[in-house]
Amino acid sequence: MHKSVKFLNDKICLNVLSHDKENAKEIYEVTQGHVLIGMLSKNYETNEQAITAMSDLSVNINGALSIGLGAGDPKQWKMVAELAGELQAPHVNQICTATGFTRARLGQDETIVNALVGPTGRPGYVNMATGYLSQEKVATEVPIETAIAMLKEMGASSVKFFPMNGLETIEEYKAVCEACAQENFMIEPTGGITLDNFKEIIKIAIDAKVPKVIPHVYSSIIDKETGLTRIEDVKKLYEVMKEVSKA
């Protein structure tokens, strides 16, 4: 595991966005470093711009950078992989089908690379067709245990289950958590997570004995006027993390 990633009680690490360096630093401090700060590749026109901005912010948070796609946009896959290789960030968000390419660009196994798979409406099965071409085709329905085995073969560290739509896909999420626990694999629940459902979502993973969980909480805690991630909300999330991770 990369030295910049800290899991609270060896179980939970929060993943949130930040508006700027100061916002990121505050988030890092109130979570006592048990956080990964996401920066979205989609926000930059060139790799050079992204590398400059990400490197600059990373210094303020002891390197706890998470390179993101941008709303799961599969067209960003190559830029993310290239940035990952250049920056050697501790956490990378990636579409399922580009996982192997990304791991190869990194050239090491310490960075957490998640692989984005989606719900199917059928508990126990996930959609692996999340690539820029495959998402336009008929969705796949792969048993979650098989999917995890394939992700391991591609060099992934965790399942990014997206979009969860909050609690709408909860039965599918439970099945994914059970499989991750069985296969000793991390999970990253993403999409529609709020202050109201955060506890239930991370508790399901912890109760299932998933080794590590990285919940992504984005738009629900961002101030629409300023673009800043609200520090008070981050504090509330961190209190819940402390409570649940003691279980």
Image (cartoon, rainbow, N blue to C red):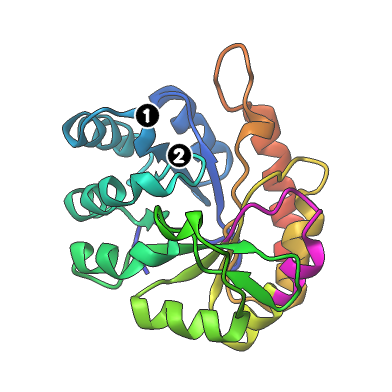
- The circle on residue 70 is 2
Image position of 177 with respect to 184: above or below = above
Residue 228: quarter of image = top right
As measured in the structure, the alpha-carbon distance from the residue carrying label 1 to the one carrying label 2 is 8 Å
User: Where, by quadrant of the figure, is residue 51 drawn?
Assistant: top left
Q: Secondary structure at mark 1?
A: helix
Quick one: SS at disc 2?
loop
Q: Which residue is mark 1?
A: 43
Whether pointer 1 and pointer 2 mark residues with C-beta atoms closer than 8 Å, the reply is yes
Query: Whole-percent x and y of residue 177?
Result: 68, 74
Relative horizontal placement of residue 125, taking residue 30 as reference (left or right)? right
| Residue in the image at 37% along x and 34% along y | 42
Judged left or right of residue 199, residue 163 is left
In percent of width and height, residue 115 lies at 46, 64
Residue 159 locus on image (x, y percent): 53, 68
Badge 1 or badge 2: first in the primary sequence = 1
Magenta stretch encompasses residue 6: no
Q: Is residue 144 above or below residue 229?
A: below
Between residues 202 and 45, which one lies in front from this camera angle? 45
Horizontal relation, residue 178 to residue 51: left or right: right
**Circle 2: residue type:** Gly
Quick check: can you spot residue 76? yes
Region rendered in magenta: 161-175
